[in-house]
Amino acid sequence: MKAADKIIQNNNAGKFICIGLDPDINKIPKHLLSYPSPITAFNKSIIEETSEYAAAYKLNFAFYESLGSRGFDIIEETLSFIPNHILTIGDAKRGDIENTSKMYAKSVFEHFNFDSVTVNPYMGKDSIDPFLQYFDKLVFFLTLTSNPGSADIEKLILKSGRFLFQEVITKINHWNQFNNCGLVFGATQNLELQDNINLFNGMPVLLPGIGEQGGNIDEIFSIFNNAGRKNFIINISRGIIYKDDSVNYSKAARNEILLLNRRIGKII
Amino acid sequence: MKAADKIIQNNNAGKFICIGLDPDINKIPKHLLSYPSPITAFNKSIIEETSEYAAAYKLNFAFYESLGSRGFDIIEETLSFIPNHILTIGDAKRGDIENTSKMYAKSVFEHFNFDSVTVNPYMGKDSIDPFLQYFDKLVFFLTLTSNPGSADIEKLILKSGRFLFQEVITKINHWNQFNNCGLVFGATQNLELQDNINLFNGMPVLLPGIGEQGGNIDEIFSIFNNAGRKNFIINISRGIIYKDDSVNYSKAARNEILLLNRRIGKII
């Protein structure tokens, strides 16, 4: 199945939540520390308890790279636990000269076999082209991000009067010749989401920033509903995986996504 | 020694060349393939033959990540061969929300102990802050890159009439409160280099794009000379490490950097 189709299929089944598997050895339940691979055990249990309800799993590479070489094995192990109909996202925010991006694309799409990747548009189209050559995969471009610093560069005003991030979205529309481009748009940027949702055209959207960062899930749904549009997933990391730090952590994660899905069911 | 001081010290000794250790298993000499760790052997031999003449070594993470978990060990092994007075650059082009950038900074500066890192400014200051908290390290921001796609976003014209990359450089000047910011500026962008060199103030500059990408080393020196300024390094990857694909590859690399240093000696 094409990566983009997984989002549509899961949306149609009422699933919009992407679980961010960003495991921090200092935050996972203490009893796991005696396991041979605590992070693997943590991810496995979270996936087993939540996969019935999740639209996607997103692995941020930073949390795995910080574990050294072992982190790469843990990415592979984690991916092996995820059922095939659920979208997997390699949250790497890559972007480099073409020769180098080719190596990154090979790593994320061939070595790990992620369905999708996040990339940074700053260096321009040729820096992302190697990713776009994988027609069945999905390439999520950073546009307007969820952090406060998004005002520094992404919201600079261009000569045309538009914000930089708006021009970036328009460029991505032009770059989308294989229908495998997606957008990352901060769930904390509701006014901008409302004003720009028509620029997205058919592209799938990944919205991080709910929870610790302050985004509100009902507002996001209301904006997408008003635009008569689906094809999006909302990422939650810490709000699900660290809901409980006892032996019940994965049951608590299951309970949290169940509650979220019920709330979503009422909205849509 | 502070990372930034290594550049000044090496420049004063007539050393301006940064060797890009971007090893590709398909391009290294065939006889190495029977070694237990061909890439480690390749890097070790290149470093041994060139370290007397090099100002810096830059490891692009893409080339190591594509080797899977083993790639991380090879980064560590490679760094152990580099003498301490030579700057090491983790070319990772990172940038993420603060919580995540903290993990990346820890990985690159604490786990690997690189002297410096490359980062992408698109997400704004808070996305880079965790790197800037390491006062003795050096953080090279992408500004105007060497690839053709740099025209897509980096050269967009702002309301102020300036190019985006110029505004990015001005912002970095403001963000440089600990004097540990540097700039990545494409060695293929000579007109722009000449026009903007005064924006750099004291910040060190890393210039990639010589060789395969078309940059010219004499022109770069002439621009820096005319501005009465040093504190820069010029990266060459393929033009040095793949100069020869026989058993003489590392001698050929040594010979190439020797020739470059002689040429530079005549210019400065």
Image (cartoon, coloured by chain):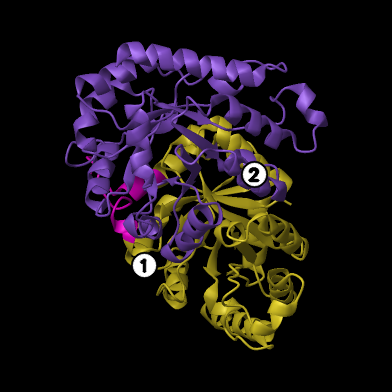
Chain colours: A yellow, B purple
Please check the rendered image and state whether residue B184 is part of the magenta-colored stretch, yes or no: no
Spatial distance from mark 1 to mark 2, Cα to Cα?
Answer: 47 Å
Q: Is residue A208 left or right of residue B14?
A: right
- Residue bearing the label numbered 2: B77
- Which residue sits at x=74%, y=65%? A82
Say if labels 1 and 2 share a chain. no
Q: Is residue A32 left or right of residue A175?
A: right
Q: Are marks 1 and 2 in contact (CB under 8 Å)?
A: no
- Residue bearing the label numbered 1: A190
The answer for which chain carries disc 1 is: A
Q: Amino acid at mark 1?
A: Asn
Q: Residue B240 has which mark? A: none
Residue B6, horizontal then vertical, whole percent: 38, 39
Residue A112 visible in the shown view: no
**Between marks 1 and 2 in the image, the one whose residue lies nearer the viewer:** 2
Please check the rendered image and state whether residue A163 is part of the magenta-colored stretch, yes or no: yes
- Which residue sits at x=74%, y=52%? A1
Q: Main secondary structure of the magenta part?
A: loop
As drawn, the residue found furthest toward the left would be B160
Please name whichever residue, A143 or B256, is drawn nearer the observer in this view of the structure: B256
Image: magenta residue range? A149-168
As drawn, the residue found furthest toward the right would be B34
Q: Is residue A141 left or right of residue A251?
A: left
Residue B241, horizontal then vertical, whole percent: 59, 23
Mark 1 falls on what kind of element?
Answer: helix
Residue A178, compared with residue B177, is above or below; it is above
Residue B164, compared with residue A246, is above or below; it is above
Please name whichever residue, A220 or B102, is drawn nearer the observer in this view of the structure: B102
Please name whichever residue, B59 or A2, is drawn nearer the observer in this view of the structure: B59
Mark 2 falls on what kind of element?
Answer: helix
